[in-house]
Amino acid sequence: MHKIGTYVNGNTIVEIFDDGTKIRYAPDDASAQPDYPESIDMKITNCCDMNCVQCHEMSTSSGKHGNLNSKLIDSLHPYTEVAIGGGDPLSHPKLPELLQKLRDKKVIANITVHWLSFLKNYQILLSWKKEGLIHGLGVSVNEVISQDVIQKIADFPNSVVHTIIGIAERNVYKQFFDEGIRILLLGYKTFGRGKEFKDSNTLNIKINTNWIKDNILKLTKHFEAVSFDNLAITQTNLKDVLDRETFDHIYMGDDGSFTMYVDLVENKYAVSSVSERHDIFSDYIEDLFAKLKE
């Protein structure tokens, strides 16, 4: 494990490591009071041709691209983690320029793509990784895929499989067992196409969700690491599965405490992608973050 960097944010000291580990502490056990977000979920496009049934953003092949010349990007601090998504972020023609800018600013860029897009653009993504343009790669998989693709994901440095609770069935998880894979469980978002799909598939979504609830500890034995977004923590009742000490040790805070969401397509910001979105009113990320905390 190699340390990428250490920085001071408000009264908080943060250490970032290359395996994704983050250590945060405030002096004298004071409550952390950051001045800007440690990580940002950044939507850069609503263009995507996958037509996923659960897509809460309702992305389509004719979806708009975001403004990657936004001055807000210039205000990002070194070692801030930015999770770049969409839509299909690889469809944005100015994505390489954004990645170069973030690298120059020492911002840690992670990107999430559908597994079919991962396969199609494998060599490009690998070259970006080698050039330091991206740090981590999320690969969205909610169906059974070939062993060849599984091996490519496992071999890709700092890759994480993303699944959606309620969509992915048990065989989706079992195909990755003992393959050296890290996995991130995402909560099911009930808006956009996600609401329409849930209304007509309530039983299957419940069955898939219950399987995750019943097998959380089993999953930890078959994956290199198992992570949850905050919505998934709620939907799996993770607090009831883990003892209080363990949960408190691994929990990184409520949405909006150290994180935020930015939509460069609609020029909006929010606590998270499932929260009410507001018009971006400033070119400085500190201003938006402070407003969310009011």
Image (spheres, grey):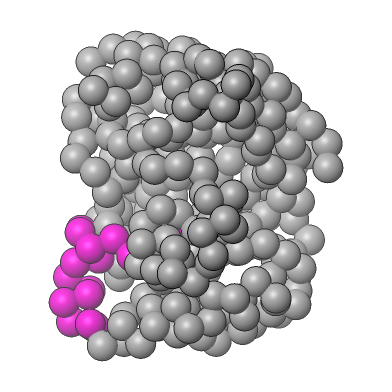
Nearer the observer, 142 or 9? 9
What span is colored magenta in the figure? 186-202
* Residue 180 visible in the current orientation: yes
* x then y, percent, for residue 153: 69, 63
* x then y, percent, for residue 33: 45, 21
Magenta run includes residue 157? no
Which residue is at a point 37% across and 41% down the rendered structure image?
A: 255
Nearer the observer, 132 or 158? 158
Rendered view: 241 above or below 292: below
Which residue is at a point 40% across and 33% down the rendered structure image?
A: 257
**Residue furthest toward the front?**
28
Which residue is at a point 36% across and 35% down the rendered structure image?
A: 256
* x then y, percent, for residue 233: 42, 61
Position of residue 183 in the picture relative to residue 260 (left or right): right
Which image quarter: residue 294? top left
Quarter of the figure with the N terminus: top right
